[in-house]
Amino acid sequence: MPSRLRSRSTRPRRPRGIQVLAKLFGGHEISAFECSAQLDSLNRMQGSIQELSMSGLTPRERVLLALAHQDTDRVPVDFIATPEAWDRLERHLGVSGTEEVLRRLGADLRHPRQSYIGPPLPPRADNCWTDVWGVCRKSISHQGGGSYEEIVHHPLAHIRNAGDLESYSWPRPEWWDPESLVRQIQALDAETPYAIALPEFGDPGGIFEISWYMRGMEQFLVDLLSQPDLAYGIMRHVTDFFMGRLERIMQVAGGRIDLVWTSDDIAHQHGPLISARVWKELVAPHHARLNRRIHELGSRIMYHSCGSIRSFIPDLIEAGVDVLDVLQFSADGMDPQEIKTSFGDRLCFHGGIDVQNTLPFGTVEEVRKVTRERIEILAKNGGYILAPTHNVQLDTPPENIVAMYAEAGSLSSSARDNLI
């Protein structure tokens, strides 16, 4: 799929709507103006944003306007969940397949992934499987149903210094097929244009996370202080891989990628996992390098971290983050009004609906109330995509999920029949 039209020697004066939307793509108007995929959406704009008919917004236009801090017909919404929660919601809605669930909820974003075409991975044995990084995981069932895949082998646990990294068999970007991503986006666009947020730069794991997956969390945290060159070297290799993956994707689909979803959990419920000094010196440079290239290629960064990350936000902005996910307001120091007031002019937000307490244990009315409050605070003057703070879990009543999207005004007419 070609991502750009040929350059023109002269260009007509661009409507204000196009100028605003072009800012979403690294500040370069030419990127938005000359991308054929962008023009499909931008040509729907007539005159200024103020004159735009909100009733005619596509999901993608709704997201792009929100990211430009513009008002929309309703708040854009997204949805993520564990497989068990997806199944339960499908049964509740009487549909089959995740795409049908997303349509019923009115989700404005989609998260397609490349197909893996690389060397065969080791076969699953004893309920364990090994990924491309050499990390081995085992499926562990938990009370109440469902399972999580916990790491049982860290392939770099044995290395002694940074020099040992050069002999390791690192994954290669060409093991994935970017054309498969193009085909998925084209199939979605045949129905309606959705905003595309690529999850494979942070799920399962970002730069810091994959590094400790490979080394072992405790050992990697020790390395940050006792062997910083080793820790830095591992993160450099992971970042190099992401940079190569990015180039391949953007070469064929760059004009259609709205958000690159990166990740690193750098905090817990009560505070940071590592000091701000260590993060700025050893971790942030890798994110900044990746983020710069994402911007140069015309997309934006949505960065995920759970926990109490208030103290990191100024530095995340400096490192190039455009959208902050997940907004875990149940964590210490995470106040929605303060964060919106302090950073809402420089940062957009994604998430905000609590999966620890509100969604699993609240009443339908409590879910609606929290959803309404988040929209009133975070969506003021745009800049907010409403979503759960993490994967919705199996113990969440489907009625509460439906109530959340009903309050956001995104439910399809058929899904409204499931309201109680």
Image: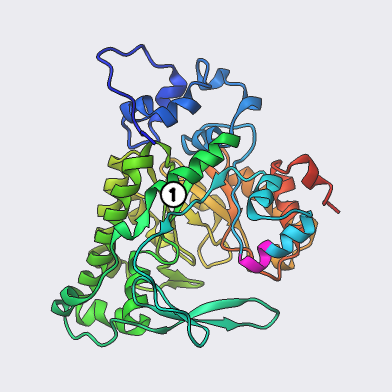
At a point 33% along the width and 77% down the height, the residue shown is 214
Bin the neighbour count of mark 1 within 10 Å (Cα to Cα): few under 14, some 14-19, many 20 and up.
Answer: some
Choose between 364 and 232: the one closer to the eye.
232
Q: Is residue 17 visible?
A: yes
Q: Where's residue 114, x and y in %? A: 43, 54
At a point 37% along the width and 12% down the height, the residue shown is 13
Residue 55 occupies quadrant: top right
Q: Is the residue 302 above or below the residue 268 in the image? A: above
In the image, is residue 85 part of the stretch drawn in magenta? Answer: yes
In the image, is residue 253 part of the stretch drawn in magenta? Answer: no
- Dominant SS in magenta: helix
Q: Is residue 84 left or right of residue 247?
A: right
Q: Is residue 145 left or right of residue 265?
A: right
Q: Secondary structure at mark 1?
A: helix
Q: Is residue 147 left or right of residue 164?
A: right
Q: Where's residue 96, x and y in %? A: 71, 55
Q: Where's residue 405, x and y in %? A: 70, 48
Q: Is residue 194 visible?
A: no
Residue 8 occupies quadrant: top left
Instruction: Residue under label 1, please give it.
Output: 180
Q: Is the residue 339 above or below the residue 383 in the image? A: below
Which quarter of the rendering shows the C terminus?
Answer: bottom right
**Mark 1 residue type:** Ser
Q: Is residue 28 left or right of residue 267?
A: left
At a point 31% along the width and 31% down the height, the residue shown is 28
Q: Is the residue 154 above or below the residue 66 in the image? A: below
Residues shaded magenta: 82-86
Residue 148 occupies quadrant: bottom right
